[in-house]
Amino acid sequence: MTAHLPALQVVIPLLAAPLCVLLRSRTIAWLLFLAAAVAALVCASVLAWQVADGEVIHYAMGGWEPPAGIEYVIDRANVPVLILVAAIGVAAAVYCRASIAAEIEASRIPLFYACLCLNLTGLLGITATGDAFNAFVFLEITSLSSYALVAMGRRRRALLAAFQYLIVGTIGATFVLIGIGLAYAVTGTLNMADLAQRLPDIYGNRALGAAVIFVFVGLAIKMALFPLHGWLPGAYAESPSAVSVFLSATNTKVAIYLLLRFAFGVFGAALVFGRMPITEVGLVLACLAMLVASAVACFQSDFKYLLAWSSIAQVGYIVAGFSLATSDGVTAAYLHVINHAVIKGALFAAAGIVVLRLGAARLSDMAGMGRTMPWTFAAIVLAGLGLVGVPPTAGFVSKWVLAEALIADGRWAVLAVLLVSSLLSLVYVGRVIEAGWFRRHSESVAVERPPLTMSAAMWALVLVSLVFGLVPEWPLSLAEGASSVLVGVAK
Amino acid sequence: MTINPALLLIAGALPIPLLRGRLRAVWMMLLAPAALAALWTLPEGVHGSFEILGLQLETLRVDALARIFATAFLAAALISMVYALHLRDALQQTVIPIYASSAVGGALAGDLITLFVFWELAGLSSVFLIWAQRTERAYRAGMRYLVAQVASGLLMLGGIVLHVNAGGGLEFGFIGASSAGGLLILLAVGIKCAFPILHAWLTDTYPEATIVGTVALSAFTTKFAVYVLARGFPGTGELVWVGVVMACFPIFYAVIENDLRRVLAYSMINQLGFMVAAVGVGGTLGVNGAAAHAFADILFKGLLFMSMGAVLLRTGTAKGSELGGLYKSMPQTMVLCVIGAASISAFPLFSGFATKSIIMEAVAEEHRTIVWLLLLFASAGVFHHAGIKIPFFSFFAHDRGHRVAEAPLNMRVAMGLAAAGSILIGVAPNLLYGLLPYEMDYSAYTTSHVINQVQLLLLASMAFTVLMRTGLYPPELPSVNLDADVIYRRLLPRLWRTSVTGLTRLRDATAPLHARAGRLTSSSTRPLQTASWTTDVMVLWVALLLALFLLISLL
């Protein structure tokens, strides 16, 4: 049984999806998604335990031996992402029942859960697979289900956001496919390990260089790297609350993982960071993202848009980390992937509660609501401090590690940008806190208590972010393990 | 088979709420003697050591210094439990032995972790003696008390962590104030020992406790702190001056204070000053003096608090301005109170004389003339505010017409025990000297000591008489005196309020500016605010980036 865990964690959500549609019951569909997420989390945890000592699990899908067959590879580089995706999936599952019931018409809810299951399948599949083309397939599964999920948003603007996401996302996926195709053309294999073995012989090849660039740009779209971020604010802010929680915490993060896997595990750091100018381009784009997106976030009047723009800035931190291509930098990137996912998930969960109770998440509507909804706004303050990186929160830990990596590499300009961006994040988080706690509401509004499940999911994420700040050993060891595998493979 | 007297006390305290009437009284009276027997059957050395989480704990260390403090604490436990017998309040009767056990356990602790546990327990258990008053005022005082105690505990914990990290080891021996960890621990002790400025919690909250509670409070927390000082910081030069300041400044407050229990709280800081100065001097005489004076102080300060408690119980007030002439109704209490007053004033043949003279001798041997003179001044001051003022204003002075019953029997017994102890130490000081941590060749009753002290007392009483006759003595007025507690009771709240109102005003004043800035930004930053690109712009960027990328890397 445990031998099949790498496949099971992907297959269970995949099977849950058609069941959701066929059974047509809202409760059963929800239970299926919850069960799928919990099962995935259990699988990921067991796998994490199995590979903790550096072992690598190879699983040949359907008994077809690689490199011809599809292979799943579980090592310390992908278990952190697997756990993250599955855990956020569980939190989103707890969160979404009450939230979705209020936002989506009843007849569409089973379809909604089917899409969520498919999305989870895709994310876990991208992370677990050791086959380049299989990764593309799962990327498409994720993307298509995301488009559908975003389109279910409560406002008509969600349709526009989904359409934009669809166009840009499809271009990104196509680029990835072109890149993989080029690599296949020059090597004749799609297995990642096999590719990694054959590629160093043909490093001068132009087609290979083009492959790297197509994959990089394609995934840069998927992870909303500035200036390819255009789809993200609309997609995150207009989608249903539960979807914002899930997408914001997982989608860009898995794209980042895939890029790291391609860069270090397929093309090789010598090619990507040595012969190609990815380090420089990555750092420049990361700095732009940190500055511009943080500045734009300061001017947002809607809480969810503000959070979305902040996500773009945070992607900048992560890209800055791995662009260094040092083991410290990759550690920082991984740590920030984990911490930011938890913090942003918590904040979008809080935003969802605000939307549910106030009808909108405009900062003007939130004025003075800290007194009426103290728990929700307290969570916003705690998670917001994490976003800024105030010690002792998780955000502080990952920014600290990132700053250390930048210093070790002598990137003082990037460090300065990091500090300025942190100040800007203080401004935009400060605006939310000021609106919630220090402004007076024009008329007193009686607000019902938020549903217990939504609060529970939000507080679970907030508490995890605090624990990761106070006791950072566990996420740090995961990140270091991942970095040792990736950077170690490259060397 | 070794029994930790502290654990014995705690275990014995637990069934108290279940017992009723006479059975409870007997049980309470047996507790302290049983613990005392357990203490004195323990051979010297380390017992009860075990390892937990890689830390070597020595929960029970018996040596002369630990034993004399533990004995004093157990004696105080016995006296305060007898004093509490008349109560119909299981809460206080249960808390007193637990609180006493924390001081006993702390005195016997061989490692810093055990010390910290009892240090916290002392604070957490004793607060109930204040809350037992069961009034809003007492609740708030209890919270202030708790803040001070918990702050001290946290400082202690931080200090211990630093001390151990710096390689100081977990053993509770000499710590010294030279390292950061040692300084933090000293600060923690300073709070509980009522160092100047850190003392405010003591005079603020002790008089708010119940009648019985104040008696118990007076015995343990501060003397526990003195013990930690004597063990961890003997010979720390700065402590001499800290002690001198503690001995001198409360005199002025005590003279003008009207609440007689608060007078005693100030007088307590004054006595602690002698002990802290003695620890600062260090050496055989210094540590011996601190230990002996702590022992005597527990008895006579307890006695004075008990007599004032009896007065408060019977008349309903402990204000100097409302008392007087009680010698007619409470003659026995009066006599016992005068014994306490004589002891604290260090009359020959009373305990204070036998113990304080060791401290004066220790200072004199170091040839620290100024310190010696200041302590001499403080001794005269003690006589003024504690030796004369307390008995004079409560039992003599103007008869305010209180016609009340004598104190309850158990209270008189408790006071009698303390008075007997005080006289015993005064008459036969060698009994106490034999218990002291270091061997010393010392006699209190030399001609020079006696004459010196008698001169001091006579002149001080003459000063009091002259001042009373000429009407220059500060009259007993119902008033509130300013002390360091205004910092947290008035200044900080007021600062907070003014800063809040100031900020609000600033905000209101700049409101037009805000509005203008808002209009400005809303027009200029609209593209930033909406910032939603059309689809073709997004795709354009993708194409641009791809082209740029291909160009720079493939050309």
Image (tube, rainbow, N blue to C red):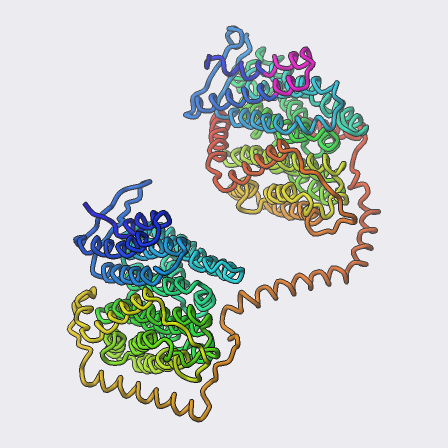
Q: Main secondary structure of the magenta part?
A: helix
Taking the image as shown, residue A321 lies to the left or right of residue A368, namely: left
How far across and down, in percent of the image, does residue B391 sit? Answer: 37, 79
Magenta residues?
A13-33
The image shows a total of numbered marks equal to 0
In this picture, is B400 found above or below A23? below
Q: Residue at x 50, y 61 (%)?
A: B138
How far across and down, in percent of the image, does residue A429 sit? Answer: 66, 45
Residue B440 falls within the magenta-colored stretch:
no
Taking the image as shown, residue A248 lies to the left or right of residue A487, namely: right
Corner quadrant of residue B206: bottom left
In this picture, is A197 found above or below B517? above
Residue A32 falls within the magenta-colored stretch:
yes
How far across and down, in percent of the image, does residue B296 sit? Answer: 27, 70
Q: Residue at x 74, y 28 (%)?
A: A103
Residue nearest the observer in this picture, A357 or A45? A357
* Residue A174 in view of the camera: no
Residue nearest the observer in this picture, A202 or A169? A169
* Residue A109 in view of the camera: yes
How far across and down, in percent of the image, does residue B111 sit? Answer: 29, 51
